[in-house]
Image: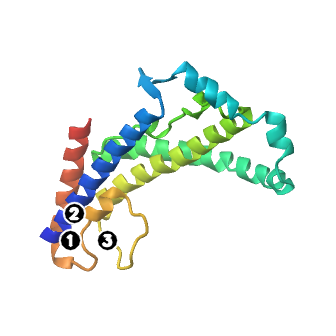
Amino acid sequence: MHTKINALIEKIQRLEEELEAELTKRQADMSFTIQNQKIIFEQEVIRRHKQFKTRLSTYTLGARPLMFITAPVIYALIVPFVLLDGMVTLYQWICFPVYGLEKVKRADYFIYDRHHLAYLNLLEKFNCAYCAYGNGLIAYVREVASRTEAYWCPIKHASRVHSPHARYRQFIDYGDAERYHAYLEKIKEELKAKQHEES
C-alpha cells in the first residue's frame, strides 16, 4: 500500500482516539460515573432530570396521528431483526472456526443504558431499548461481514464507498491483479494475528 495512504490512515486513527478522549471528558461533565458496568448519577442530577420527564399520557396524547400509524411498521421490524441476529450468529459459529477467524463478541455491540435516564418516560425507554437493539445488531452484523469480506475478498471497489468499515482502508486497490493473490494471503494472516492480539 502507498506510504501516503498509510500515513493518512494512521492520522485518522489518531484523530479517532483523540475524539474518543474528548467524548470521555464530556461524559464527566454530565455528572455520572460507571462502576462495575453500572451507571451512577448524583442524586441532585436525578432530581433535576425528573423535572424534564414528560408524563406518559401527555407523551402519547400529544403525538401526531401519523405517529400511531407508522408505529406498527417500526415495531414489525423486530421479526427480521431477530431472524438476522440468529442467522448471523449461527453463521459465524459454524464458519469462523473453519476460516480460523475469532468470533465477534455479540455482547460488545448491544448497549442498554438509556433506561437509567430519569427524564425518559416508560415508552421513551422502550423505544430507546428498541433502537439500541436495532443499531447494535447492525453494528454486530457489520463486524461479522467485514471480517468475512477481509478474509475472502479484500478488494476496494472502483466506485467510492460511503461509510466503509474500518478494514476497508487496508484492502488492495481495485484492478491490482499482480499483487492480489499474495496480498490475499497476507491480509488473512494479519486479520488472524490482529484478532489474537485483541483477545
For discs 3 and 1, the disc positioned in front in the rendered view? 3
Q: Position of residue 21 (x, y in %)?
A: 32, 42
Q: Nearer the viewer, residue 80 or 18?
A: 18
Question: Could you give the CA–CA distance between mark 2 and mark 1, rounded to whole angstroms?
Answer: 6 Å
Lower position in the chain sequence, tag 3 or tag 2: 3
The residue tagged 3 is 156
Q: Amino acid at mark 2?
A: Leu
Q: Nearer the viewer, residue 129 or 184?
A: 129
Question: Could you give the CA–CA distance between mark 3 and mark 2, rounded to whole angstroms?
Answer: 12 Å
Q: Residue at x 40, y 37 (%)?
A: 105
Mark number, residue 180: 1
Q: Nearer the viewer, residue 119 or 177?
A: 119
Residue 26 in the image: above or below residue 44? below
Helix, strand, or loop for circle 1? helix
Mark number, residue 83: none
Helix, strand, or loop for circle 3? loop
Q: Specify the quadrant that holds the C terminus.
A: top left
- The answer to which quarter of the image holds residue 69 is bottom right
Q: Position of residue 166 (x, y in %)?
A: 33, 57
Lower position in the chain sequence, tag 3 or tag 1: 3
